[in-house]
Amino acid sequence: MSSATPTPTRVRRLPVLGALRLGRPSDVWFKPALSVVAAVAPPSLLLVVLGRLDLAAYTMAGSLCALYAHNRPYAARAKVLAWVVLGMLGGLAVALLAASLTRNAVVLVTVGALLAAVQKVMCDATRVGPPAHVILTFVSSAALFVPQTLGQVPGHLALAAAAGAWAWLVGMAPAPLRPHGPERRATAQALDAAAAYAETARGGEEGAGARSAAYAAVHAAWQTLLAAGDRPSTARRALERLVVRAEVALAAAADADPARLRAWARAVRGTGRIPRTGDPRRDDGGPRRDDGGPRRTDSGARLDGDGPRQDGGPRRTDSGARLDGDGPRQDGGPLGERDELVGVAAERAVAPRPLWSRLGPLAPVAVRSALGCALAGYVSLALGADRPYWALVTAASLYQANITLTWSRTVQRVVGNLVGVLLFAAVTPVAQLCPLALVLCILACNFGAEALIGRNYWLGSVCVTPLALLVTELPGYQPTGELVTDRVVDTLVGALVGFVAAVAVTDRRAGRRVERALAAVDHARERAARLAADPAATPAALETARRALAAAVVDLRATADAAAGEWWQRALPQERVVLAEQAAHRTLAATVRRQGLLPGPGTTSTYTHTEGASP
């Protein structure tokens, strides 16, 4: 590999207007928005009827769990939602116990800061989110400053647990109607990303960015399909074949048909039958050569004659692979179909990475969270605030993968909260009409927050801020001017102190993680290249090596991007990263070609027309 000149990374430009730019809404923005309304409304309305709206803060803790895991397949969602509910109850239990044992505000802020750090690290390590740790921290921090007695704690936890169970049911409710909805969306995103890369394949830097995004989308689609359970259905196999087509498009973007990829994506997003693709190894309807020679597969392996073998055994390729005839395989799939998907079973057999191994790199984030949240709470107390947890939660919401992203989140949080307090002042006269009006305003803010936050965090915060302020009025109405003033001050304190803590506690190991990611890509590339050159390599080994290399490339790009936004560290080997990515993509294309999913260089594209649909 050629020597690379490190690129200095200490000079940073902090974006302001760019941080506020609106993006496209999520494909499923309405799902969390409707789910949280369905989860919050019944318990809250029941408490209105019973005249105990003061208990709604505890039921809302469980109801807010409905915000999670909307991108997970239902088999995985059931487990993730259960863990989220347990995590919510655990944080709430610690907060209620602390509130019942002491009223010392400094102790309570310290407990809240430690809880925020634990919640941040656990959500990052398990990749639970969005909304990740922010909701958990908001609930536990607010509960710290609600007067409690030990005798009340079990009842309040029971209310939260009951609402959490209802939120679990709300989250799982779409499963009978659209059991493969999350997998279909992930597959459609992979196809769209592959089409976008195919359209910009000749576009230099833009093409490189589209390629990275496409590989990340394909990797995410595989992870979603692998998380869907151990019993693949006909629909799941059809989705897996479509993701294979997205991978083929990445390996040979010049031969890909973006229009067909987007057509498949539109069909998958809908509620109809999943498109079924043909075998990409066959571009002319049959494997016979045009030169009159012996029949061969698209990868060049000779068949043992046109007729049955004289020994009565099945025909095989030169490498020994069995062919069950020209028609459909006995397993119901087209010729070569099982070879495409054999790596899926291999990946399902790989043990997941232990949780403890994912916690180590998060140590700087944990220190940032604990220190920033604690200092924000202490400064708020020093300024005479009655609700220091607002400053604590503001600081907790800032911390992202690096300081540059943390700065962007700081700008978004401040702008969103300042606009949000104005919205609160506008809706307060309506909310204070009666308890039912208050609940309806809370539901509207919940819906608005989830509907808008996908466009940009600050836009969602415009609704989150009045929501948090309205929750404080559940036990009784508060003076509007006092609430607005306190929220503005705590927002500014939390944002300023939280960002200073992020700058003070830098992640100096980011560069070493880039080096490890580079080594992982080199190792995966060498293994894939070795197998691609081995005529005796099995389809399972090739597929597993290809997926491992693709995952390593995705991890390298994410690691490099995160490190590039970190401050006070040594220069990063940016050129080495680019060279490693280019070499890995060439090897991925060679591996796909070796599997017979692509034609040889200089031949025509192997994409087949959509043959029909699978149920």
Image (cartoon, rainbow, N blue to C red):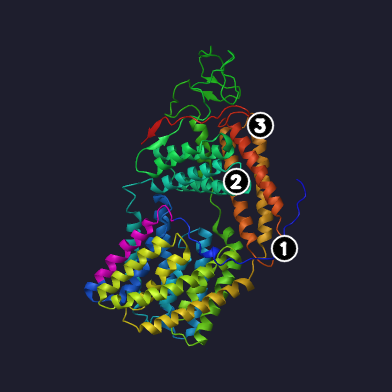
Determine whether 123 is above or below 55 in the image.
above
Residue farthest along the left direction in this orientation: 49
At horizontal 59% and vertical 58% (from top left) the residue drawn is 357
At horizontal 65% and vertical 60% (from top left) the residue drawn is 564
Callout 2 amino acid: Gly
In depth, the one of 13 and 243 nearer the eye is 13
Kindly state the secondary structure of the residue where label 2 is placed.
helix
Pointer 1 residue: 570
Quadrant where the C terminus is found in the figure: top left
Pointer 2 residue: 207
Q: Please give left or right for residue 41 compared with residue 295 in the image.
A: left
Q: Quadrant of residue 404?
A: bottom right
| Magenta span contains residue 582 | no
Please report whichever mark, 1 or 3, sits nearer to the chain's N-terminal start.
3
Q: Please give left or right for residue 311 compared with residue 446 in the image.
A: right
Quadrant where the N terminus is found in the figure: top right
Pointer 3 residue: 534
Residue 440 at least partly seen: yes
Instruction: Answer whether labels 3 and 2 touch (C-beta < 8 Å).
Output: no
Distance of label 1 from label 3 (alpha carbons):
40 Å
Q: Quadrant of residue 142?
A: bottom left
At horizontal 53% and vertical 11% (from top left) the residue drawn is 310
Q: What is the span of residues highlighted in magenta in the rendered image? A: 25-46
Distance of label 1 from label 2 (alpha carbons):
28 Å
Kindly state the secondary structure of the residue where label 3 is placed.
loop
